[in-house]
Amino acid sequence: MKAKEKYKQKAEKSQMKTKEQKVFMKPGKNNKEDRENFIKYWVNYIKTHSDKEWSSQQKVLIDSQISK
Amino acid sequence: MKYNKKKKEIILDKELNNLDKFALDFFNIAIKYTDCVIISGYVSILLGRSRATEDVDIFIKKISKENFYLLYNDLISNGFWCINSDNPDALFDYLKENLAIRFARGKIPLPNMEMKFPKDKLDEDAFEDSIRVKLPNGEIKISSIERHIAFKKYFLGSEKDDEDALHIEELFKEDIDYEKIKKLHELLKLRKK
């Protein structure tokens, strides 16, 4: 019984985690709208994550183009 | 990211990328000699925009030739070089003619800092109408959110500029003074004429 309860809790926790991680972006009707939607999507990511988290991803993008 | 509108301050605990380090190093040298403010695309990038750039625009307050020599020598001794000339007299003349000069670091000219004097009152106002961005390793001064949006949307206006403005608008939508943007828009219309 205990193990079953533990498993249930683990599953719920994992579902919550999945819900937190998956935020979907609406595709734009054209390239302009799609790019704008992505900007909004990325800003939402910035707002919902710590500075360290989003900036480490920005760092990968920028450092791949700009060397020290 | 915490924006304190009253204090005109953003606290940004970001992991600095190579472009941030480059801009911060340059800013820390330049600010010893004159007031400086970073404007345009890098403002959006510093605040999270997912793109890189080849240049970082910086206004420096008009300074004497002697002071410019000191600034130039400090930049050179810290590994920067000017891609327009190695003659500080010529560089100072460029600045006086309202032309921008570019400083890079290392062997390649990318990225570079595009340094210029303000050319009119609207540019000069950027020094006061600014925000201090406190980073883990230092501080950078950028133009205000409203000024940044107004210039990007109503003066520069390319697709990239519109996107840079959108990024900042989305990020700070609860704090933006839209009346101020409107006033700046009017001033920019006059400048375009």
Image (tube, coloured by chain):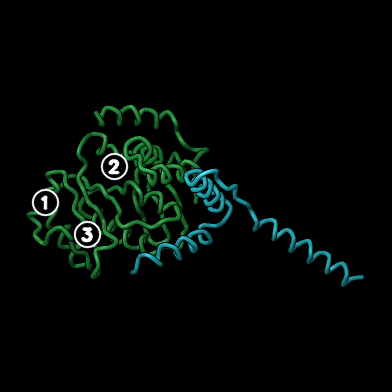
Chain colours: A cyan, B green
Badge 3 marks a residue whose secondary structure is strand
Q: Amino acid at mark 1?
A: Phe
Could you give the CA–CA distance between mark 3 and mark 1, rounded to whole angstroms? Answer: 13 Å
Report the residue marked by disc 1. B92
* Other residues around mark 2 within 10 Å, as few (<14) / some (14–19) / many (≥20): many
Q: Residue at x 43, y 51 (%)?
A: B47
Q: Which mark is residue B127?
A: 2
Q: Is residue B68 shown above or below B151? A: below
Q: Chain of mark 2?
A: B
* Residue B18 drawn at (x, y percent): 37, 65
Which quadrant holds residue B155?
top left
Labels 2 and 3 in the same subunit: yes
Q: Amino acid at mark 3?
A: Phe
Residue closer to the observer: B140 or A32: A32
Q: Is residue B163 left or right of residue B117?
A: right
Instruction: Tell me which numbered mark, 1 or 2, is placed earlier along the sequence.
Output: 1
Labels 1 and 2 in the same subunit: yes
* Other residues around mark 1 within 10 Å, as few (<14) / some (14–19) / many (≥20): many
